[in-house]
Amino acid sequence: MSSRTAADTRLLVEKSLRRRAWAERRFRAYGLGAVLLGVVFVFFLFASIISKGYTAFLQARVTLDIFYDPAAIDPEGTRQAETLAMANYSALVRAALREKFPEIEGNARRRALYALVSSSAAFELQHRVQADPSLLGQRQRLSFLAAANVDQLLKGKIDRRLPEANRVLTDQQIACADKLVNDGQLKLRFNSAFFTGGDSREPEQAGVWGAVVGSMYTLAVTLLLSFPIGVAAAIYLEEFAPRNRWTDLIEVNINNLAAVPSIVFGLLGLAMFLNFFGMPRSAPLVGGFVLTLLTLPTIIIASRAALKAVPPSIREAAFGMGASRLQMVGHHVLPLAMPGILTGTIIGMARALGETAPLLMIGMVAFIVNVPRSLADPATVLPVQIYLWADSSERAFLERTSAAIIVLLAFLIVMNAAAVILRNRFERRW
Amino acid sequence: MSTSALLLLIAAMAVLGYWLGKHRSLALVGGGRGIRQLHSLPGYYGLLTALWCALPCLAILLVWLAGQESVITTLVLRGLGTAATSEHASSGLLMNNIRNVAAGVIPADGVSPQVQAGAAEYLRLRSISAMAISGVILALGLAALFWVRARIAPQLRARNAVEAIAEKLLLACSTLAVFVTLGIVLSVAYESIRFFHSVPVHDFLFGIEWSPQTRMRDDQIGSSGSFGAVPLFLGTAMISGIAMLVAVPVGLFSAIYLSEYANRRFRSVAKPLLEILAGIPTVVYGFFAALTVGPILRGFGESVGLEVASESALAAGLVMGIMIIPFVSSLADDMITAVPQSLRDGAYALGATRSETIKQVVLRAALPGIVGGVLLAVSRAIGETMIVVMAAGLAANMTANPLDAVTTVTVQIVTLLTGDQEFDSPKTLAAFALGLVLFLVTLSLNVFALYIVRKYREQYE
Amino acid sequence: MSAESTAIPVPVLPVSAACKTVGSVAVADPLISARDVNVYYGEKRAIMDVNIDIARNQVLAMIGPSGCGKSTFLRCLNRMNDTIEGARVTGLISMEGSDIYDKRKDVVQLRARIGMVFQKPNPFPKTIYENVAYGPRIHGLAADRVELDEIVTTSLRRAGLWDEVKDRLNNPGTGLSGGQQQRLCIARTIAVNPEVILMDEPCSALDPIATARIEDLIDELRASYAIVIVTHSMQQAARVSQRTAYFHLGDLIEVGETDRIFTNPRHKLTEDYITGRFG
């Protein structure tokens, strides 16, 4: 080597430069490619869901002239509550449709016509009449939900060029719908029912409110249990625990629980809460218990990190003033660590909100129409609702599913944004 | 009284206790002036009284809540005699009916007289139980209140006592994690052992045919259900494998790019965008896999003349890989930034290019940590449920073709346990056996991976 | 650049009149010349208008109180500051007449010519052999395994480490003692056959015996390389160097023959530092 001069070395290095510069560029391109690929995935995912789902926020509604025909509803004129409850209100809707399209005759063709309006129209009329029996004999112009297929037609999701046999709507139905549109009686409007209604077998009536309330109840239980327990556990481990085998065991346990598949927690919930303690199936209470066990490790780990970030000098200062250990934690360390703890808690809650699998195990997959009123009522949650709708074969549920996902993601974005703001505004760097 | 009312009662007694204890201590030393004669601040005497009143009551309430249902069930069933159970398929079904009638879900006039009687008895026992617990709690709480109040003296070390109790409570909270693990092991293992009574362990672990449908009618032949889980293990392995093929290179390279190449502005935009992937619920990925990626792959397959199943392993694996990208990337990022700058400087000073430094020095130094991170990611892939439930299908095929449909352990657990279930059929219990396998596999992966990662971190601390 | 061009003496670059450094900044036929060099970390100016030449086959010691910018300046010479985000260098640093900060120049080539040894020994987590072979490998200096073996052997010999490690070349480099690790880093550096070796307080993490060995080594290496060493210890500067530069709060105060600086400092600040009034 000593035989080689500096100039020789320089030549050799120079010779290698081209190859190495290429290798460098290639490597860099791989890295950039990977990042861009990930970013493209994010956009593709959002674009695909939003493009499928935004239409669900609009809903086709039919405006019809309804005649509250006393002969059809209360032929005897008794106005008794029972008669009003049992009456056939869909006859009124049908009559209105026949009136609008007198040219359509024959049972089959008429049935096809009736199918343009959602079955919920009859219930709506029933509610109106029961609330105000004096409506009988009057005429009213009312707007009803259109059937899901008409809704899809208006949103351009049904291909008119397909042969009639391959379509969910017949030529006659399409012609009728077009006529209604031309007369201004069939329009897309804001779909408030989606945000206020519970689940339904009919896509046009299905809403997310029941699932949102279920999620709120479940999360409330989760938060009320996991926050105090998690923070207490973190305080013990960080500030009180002696270093011994038992503490090590607890630590290893917590770290492992954080990585145990969520479905295993569902199995635990099923075997313990439902079968052993006999708690009710499908209840937000039990869902909250299961999610508590699931989020505890997250909260404990985040809280410990926040406590650890408080410098020891604060603790020494408190001890120096004669504070007891509990006072030191309560008066100084915990308040200083609180922003970090809250950030961790919000992130844990966001994860709990999106969790599905363990809740399937404890029966929160039931078809539930009513909005839950208490912690023990059967309920479902948003992600499970998404799962249920995604499983349904009807095309109209596809956009509902995407719309429910948009609602879920909106909640998650708000929660995560709150966590970020909290961290940026209050977290102190020592 | 309902549970929430009982909780309110306890809270009210605790507040009363606080007030009593505080004033008692002040009264003993003759008001605010004598406060120096007290060992602790008056508030601590109040807290001590409140704690002594509330904690025993809460403990009793918990025991009652946990036990009442099973006690009442036993009593109701015993009261009805064995005749009733033979008529209904099982005592569980009977009890379900009784509860539904009692809760008013099912109208009482449409059921058998036995169920009606049972429901009446059930309601009666419940009301007795509720009265009893209310009385017990009230009596216990008040007794504790006055007992502690009588023992308050200026020398009583109230603060120390309160802090000792508080520390015990903190300890109890931290111990919960151990009990959760214990609970998982015990409950899952218990049901699994029941399963292995009817299906030998060996058949389960090494059998190659999975068709858990037990016969519907007695005269049906040959469908007694077979529980060979190998197809599920293979399916799980294949989907996880595909996921790792996506997640490891993309995650690792993006971590490298973001930590070693990107400037601050690019990083501050791209990193949060990638982390969004980690925050998206798995059910959304499942939907995406089943309704967007699946059809795309199918369409692509058709255009090049390949047969792609509508629920292919590839679609589920790809999407699962996307989900795991941020997980791998953030772990790798941690490991890479843990490599000390001095090592990088050493390589740069020799004239190494950036990529040479990264490939030959940084990655080599970070290798143990990255391996640990990848193992954690594998454990996540194995335990992931919703994506495969929605996109991978139920067919227990033994195939090496990623374009075919396969099923996984988690899919089968969900399928076996959702819907109506009886707790004695091997079909239901099989889910717990699968859960046990899943738990043990992921647990050992996690323990091993966390150990590696911790060792690695210690090395550079 | 061809071998012949080095035979012609490199012309001395003019020093601007504003330069306040005391002593002989320039040398004849300089290997590296720095003119009006400033380094900024963000808004902060870490060193100010430094002018100095580095001569061939000579040890230049840079001394001064902590935070005076001597390490910063050292890291300018092989552009290690490039790796620090927000660091900016102005002025001219030329090596044999060409600007090392020229955008068209490859930093890789520069660092192959100017090696560096760090304060804390930083062997790669590889075997001893691989540590030394790393540089020749990436630069393609060895045609085959035999030549690579030869380079590794010679480098370890010259670093005075061969006898201690010849039987365990395949053991990890991190398993050596601190002094051995530092000599391994020196062997690693000279395996690339550089022209200049920069040493950033190479002995500060070592015990006195290991320090003495490194100092002897520096003296031997001077025959082949130009060496720039940053040191905290004035005794070390006096022992190993021929020229000494004194930095103070980012300014280069005085440069001169080591003997002269230590016996007859001209600037008040230099005198204060050398006589131990601050440090």
Image: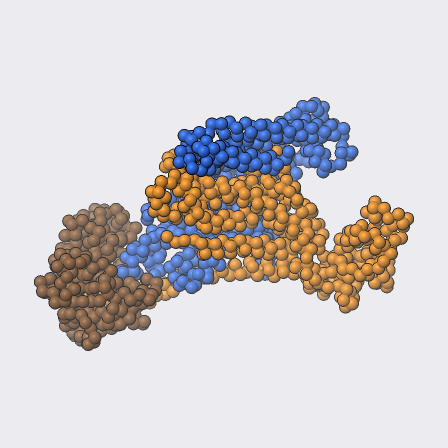
Which chain's colour is brown? C
Image coords of residue C253 (percent x, y): 18, 67
Image coords of residue C146 (percent x, y): 23, 56
Nearer to me, C149 or C12: C12
Which chain's colour is orange? A
Task: Judge from the rendering whether residue C206 lies leftward or rightward of residue A235; answer left or right.
Answer: left
Task: Judge from the rendering whether residue B272 lies leftward or rightward of residue A67; answer left or right.
Answer: left
Quarter of the image where the N terminus of chain B is located? top right
Residue B183 in view here: no
Q: Residue at coordinates 32% horizontally, 62% vertically from top-left?
A: C83
Q: How is the image coloured?
A: by chain
Count of numbered tags: 0
Q: Residue at coordinates 22% horizontally, 49% vertically from top-left?
A: C178
Q: Is residue A17 above or below residue B3?
A: below
Task: Judge from the rendering whether residue A333 lies leftward or rightward of residue B110; answer left or right.
Answer: left
Q: Is residue B81 above or below residue A231?
A: above
Q: Residue at coordinates 46% horizontally, 50% vertically from top-left?
A: A339
Nearer to me, A262 or A169: A262
Which chain's colour is blue? B
